[in-house]
Amino acid sequence: MQNPKLSFIKNLFDLLSSMRFAVSLLSILGVASIIGTVLKQNEPYENYIVKFGQFWFGLFETLGLYDVYHSGWFLVILLFLVVSTSFCIYRNTPMMLREWRTFKEHATEKSLHAFSHQATFNHVADVEGAKQKLIGFLASKGFQYKIRQQADGGQLIAAKAGTHQRWGYIFTHVAMVVILFGGLLDGNLPFKLQELLGQKRIETLDIPLSQVPAQSRMPISNPSFRGNMTLPEGSSSNVAFIRVRDGYLVQELPFAVALKDFRIEHYATGQPKSFESDLVIIDPALEAPVTKTISVNHPLTYKGIAIYQSDFQDGGTTLNFNVWNLLAPNNQTQGLSGAIFDKAKLGDGDHALSVEFNDFRKFNIINLSPDGKGKPHNVGPNVTYKLRDNRGQAVEYVTYMQPMQIDGKFYFISGMRETVQDEFRYLRIPADDDLSLHNFMHFRATMFDATQYEKIAKKIADSSLDVNKDKAIRAQFESSIVRLLAVFAQGGYNQVARMIEEHVPESERETSAATYIKMINIAAYEAYNLSLTQQKKPALGHGPEVEMLLRESLNAFSDMFFYGAPYYLQLVQFEHKEASGLQLTKSPGQKWVYLGSVLLVLGIFAMMYIRERRIWFYLKPDANQVHFAMASNRKNLDFEQEFDLYRNQLTSLIS
Amino acid sequence: MSNLPDYQQKPLLQRLDWQDWLYAVILLIGAVFAFTKYAHYMDAYEVSFLFGAAVLSSYLGWRWRALAKLVLAVGLVSLIAVSLYQGSLERVSQVFVLKFLIASQSAIMWMNVLFVLAMLTYWFALYRRSAFTANVASSLTWVAVLFGFVGLMVRWYESYLIAPEVGHIPVSNLYEVFVLFCLITALLYLHYEQKLNTKQLGGFVLLVINAAVGFILWYTFDREAHGIQPLVPALQSYWMKIHVPANFVGYGAFSLAAMVALAYLLAAKGVLASRLPSLDVLDDLMYKAIAVGFAFFTIATILGAMWAAEAWGGYWSWDPKETWALIVWLNYAAWLHLRMVKGLRGPTLAWWSLIGLLITTFAFLGVNMFLSGLHSYGTL
Ligand code: HEM
């Protein structure tokens, strides 16, 4: 009687150590790995919400899809792989070792006749002499052999070559277990357990370091971690941040790291050539601080913790702006200063906006050629900031300090967007010949200044012959221009379009729109000249250049109404301060993984390039006959060819 | 001369004749020359790669005479090209031989043209069952490989002419590695062509090579991506010099296997069966190619992990390229298990290796096109 419980365990063992199960696991692991490459991992959770909606976001979160490779179920697959491979090793190794050692010298004449590759050499005159020849043959082919006297008086020479191949199996599969073991050591299993037990939890709020509770801190003794540290120039820190899902953990370090200087070097083309940080390690155990420059591909290891150059960001660059109120009928500016990661305030009362300075980039390599085929080049610094109203709504801006050259003309560029998912939409303000904003800003102020409209209307009427014949017509003409300018100042082209829709019958809209646009252009010309006169600058002439300038200025004017806020922040001065992004890792599993890798390579080469072959010669007593049989655990063409070759060589050797 | 029995084969070192030794000595002199001239550009690893390359090329040349001839020819033509430059990139447009033959761009264009011609010739030879035509096809392939390697060598030199700080081995972007892919796949094929003494598979293998040629042409003319770009910081490492070539031996071998699988599937259905090698031979070749590919791909992935440990701070980050390398690796591991342990043969495995090529192509190209990650390596 079989014990059903035992047979269940045996069946389970058989299943787990079976090839079918292993191949299925390999396939499942492959497919599961794909998920994490298709869905971007470890993004901020808001991005996923926006992308998938609340329902799918929740479902995917439950499935752990935002960090697949650390999710429970993925680890279970890996664990199964370890178990299955270990069982497989356990099951096959004794057999492999036996095969490696044995000569199979217990074969009998009868069993040899059952081989698929065999031959019989008859009429061997001198069997003893043949035996010596066969031994010589085997030795020269690299076979080891053993001779055994048979019961029937015959002799069996059993030989083997390439049985080290069997070690290939052992090495390869042990390697997999070793590598996965190393990987698990470096995984976050200890934290996961502590989290399950409620001893640790991730911090999801952006709070000062000192307020992070002990529950979210990992001690110096943590055997393995991979954290980040952002160090502004001139500062130091003794903790790293480990990103986990939508939060983080604070990793305490046994020393402090200070950043003396961070450098980016560029090639002549503007692409970055190197990122380097001059680090100082401050450790009470050290007599003098250690200083070392690290760069990409050249990390520093101290106390088992490796410090890598990983990225860089702004370290709190200080900024000075001229702020223009785009919608005001004057061109006064106010100063504003701040620093990246700081806040400032604009305006007051209900309309006050808080300015959050997010990022500053000194170099921006952009391809501005119209067909995209030209060379990218550096367009100078830009600053990214948000303007947030008192209801918490924010608009994000990116503003370039220097005007950019597009199609041979210079423009001040500032982009805005309401959410991170949107593309930036750009306001393009034509720059003056001296690359300043003044002309546009004066023109803009004039267009807003209702007290100037009559003057403008009069000028236009003066130069228009038709309307001067009749006083009433002239007055009507002038007032319609004043009205048009007032409408335009309320919302640019869009407002004009709305007015047309409200007051003009559909059939006449197109013609009247054309008329209005022409009028606006003429008025803009006068307004521009008026603003130039006020600045004591020479008036505009005529020609395509001027038309283009007016068109661009009017477009910019119209776009201002969609800019999200009335403030244009012109960056006038900055003091650059960078921060180096470091990665700190402690990875005790690395040696195991490397050891496993060496085993793996040795094993694979052994398994594939060492060919196990066995030869038997049976020397029949008193029969002048030698029986030859050959076998291999891998039957392939090489083996067939080798057998044919040996058979021919042996024939001429002993027959 | 010999008191050895005639079945005995002498060990490799005793089989070498004076030509073999001359070849090795030339390579060694070349390495020493490069070392004395450029040692200050190299770190200890790179010096060991230089001499390692000389030893490896000697060994491979001893095992395969035709390769030795190729190595010498590539060296000779590249040296001629370099001497014609006289240290100035301007000379590309002034010297006839450079402009139309062996400047990097021109040599690679010749490679492209010759691969196309070779493919057509192989197919014509298969159709006509003409051994002579097949020999011509084979020679065309050899010359294409010669031009390709010259193109890469000269490109390497050109990169230093742009500016010493820009100089780097030409395996750093998609354009360059596609050329490398063509060359390695062609060499692997030529090796088996000689070993199995059959030229019937050339047309098949050149299909996949010419797909890569098509990509190179599109990349050159549509994207103008053939220019030499300086290396981003992450790629400035000696690891690149071994990781990338090892990977491409893997990709090349898998592609070769897939094309043999295609031939197998056709022959198994009776298509071209009388013109192709027997199914057993095809099956065996498919296995050998995958075995070579698997071994090199394993090494490449391990080297990649070691590089990642040095550049990114972790030997494994589940970056999409890394993950897809793992998927490719798992795929062929499963393939090998079915064949070696279950003893599976025939159409199933042939289909599998054909589909394996899709997975491999995605890992090689698709990841760059559709996914983003840490690999700062050629986006389209
Ligand atoms: C982590 C999962 C595994 C990996 C990555 C792996 C990998 C490999 C590789 C690369 C080979 C060599 C194929 C060749 O020689 O070309 C191989 C062979 C083999 N594997 Fe696995 N294997 C795994 C799990 C297993 C399991 C669970 C079994 C249990 C049945 C198994 C049984 C075998 C056997 C019997 C061979 C052939 C050995 C020989 O004939 O010499 N493998 N494996």
Image (spheres, grey):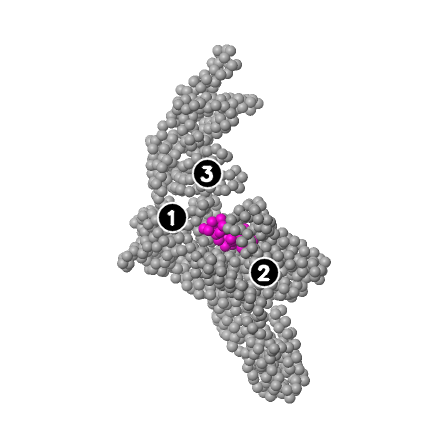
Given this view, does label 3 or label 1 mark the residue nearer the observer? 1
Q: In this view, does A47 lie above or below A24?
A: above
How far apart marks 1 and 2 lie (CA) works out to 45 Å
Residue receiving disc 1: A263
| Residue type, mark 3 in image | Phe
> Which residue: 58% across, 67% down?
B19
Is ligand 1 closer than 8 angstroms to the Cβ of mark 3? no
> Which residue: 49% across, 26% down?
A546
Magenta stretch, residue numbers: B151-178
Disc 1: CA contacts within 10 A as few (<14), some (14-19) or many (>=20): some
Residue receiving disc 3: A424
Q: Position of residue A583 (x, y in %)?
A: 38, 53
**The residue tagged with tag 2: helix, strand or loop?**
helix
Which badge, 3 or 1, comes first in the chain's sequence? 1
**Is residue A395 something that shows in the picture?**
no
How far apart marks 2 and 3 lie (CA) works out to 55 Å
- In the picture, the quarter occupied by the N terminus of chain B is bottom right
Q: Is residue A624 above or below residue A426?
A: below
Residue receiving disc 2: B70
Q: Is residue B169 magenta?
A: yes
Q: How many marks?
A: 3
**The residue tagged with tag 3: helix, strand or loop?**
loop
Q: In this view, does A402 lie above or below A264?
A: above
**Is residue A535 something that shows in the picture?**
yes
Picture quarter containing residue B136? bottom right
Q: Position of residue B37 (x, y in %)?
A: 47, 58
| Residue type, mark 2 in image | Leu
